[in-house]
Image (tube, helix red, strand yellow):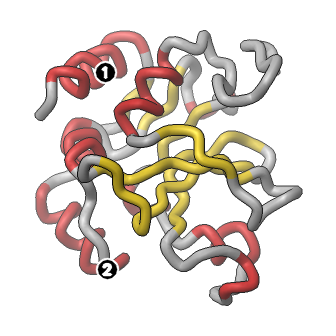
Amino acid sequence: MPAIMDRLLAEISQSHFPEPPATPAQLAAFEARVGWALDEDLRAFYLHCDGATLFAPREKAPNYRILPLAEVQRARIRMRHQDTDTYGAPSWYTLLYLQDGDYVLVDIAQRLGGRYTLLDAFHETYPAVEPIAASFSEFLERALASGDAFFWLSGSTPED
């Protein structure tokens, strides 16, 4: 595992709210269910914790909730309840829940350096999406440094 993921996962364990780790069997079952393999960043994360909330526990409705494997699903089904191309690409999957029906998606069709690209999916304009990070590790590093703000939104503050 790259040193950056080691550092980020240690920070999650020390200062945030991780769930217990997924087992290798759970990862294999997830990959069989969705039909794609986790990249190196995501595999390391889920073997460390099967979901997490950043900055606040889940019961406090945190801004960042990294979904457990059981809740990762095709975005168009989760966001529009239909599995048709009208409601987004089949390669987009929910990865983080951001409140109010907004998500960060992983695009399994877009890989840079072997890692999946992450997209912002605002519920009111979906299926229009915007790329926000070239990898999960980049996203996680920027999110952890954000002070609980949505770092990719102009003028975002921790109170947003």
Residue 110 in picture, x, y percent from top left: 42, 61
Q: Tell me which residue sits at (55%, 18%) in the image.
A: 55
Q: Looking at this view, is 90 or 9 the one in front?
A: 90
Mark 2: give few (<14), some (14-19) or many (20+) Cα within 10 Å: few
**Left or right: 142, with 26 as reference point:** right
**On screen, residue 65 above or below 111:** above
Residue 61 in picture, x, y percent from top left: 69, 32
Q: Which mark, residue 35? A: 2
As helix, strand or loop, the secondary structure at mark 2 comes to loop
**On screen, residue 129 above or below 81:** above
Residue 144 in picture, x, y percent from top left: 48, 18
Residue 57 in picture, x, y percent from top left: 55, 25
Q: Which mark, residue 62? A: none
Amino acid type at mark 2: Gly
**Residue tagged by mark 1?**
8
Disc tally is 2
If you read the primary sequence from the N terminus, does the residue marked by circle 2 or circle 1 appear first? 1
Mark 1: give few (<14), some (14-19) or many (20+) Cα within 10 Å: some
Q: Tell me which residue sits at (41%, 30%) in the image.
A: 138
Quarter occupied by the C terminus: top right
Report if the CB atoms under discs 2 and 1 are less than 8 Å apart.
Answer: no
As helix, strand or loop, the secondary structure at mark 1 comes to helix
Q: Tell me which residue sits at (26%, 47%) in the image.
A: 113
Amino acid type at mark 1: Leu
Q: Residue furthest bottom?
A: 84
**On screen, residue 24 above or below 52:** below
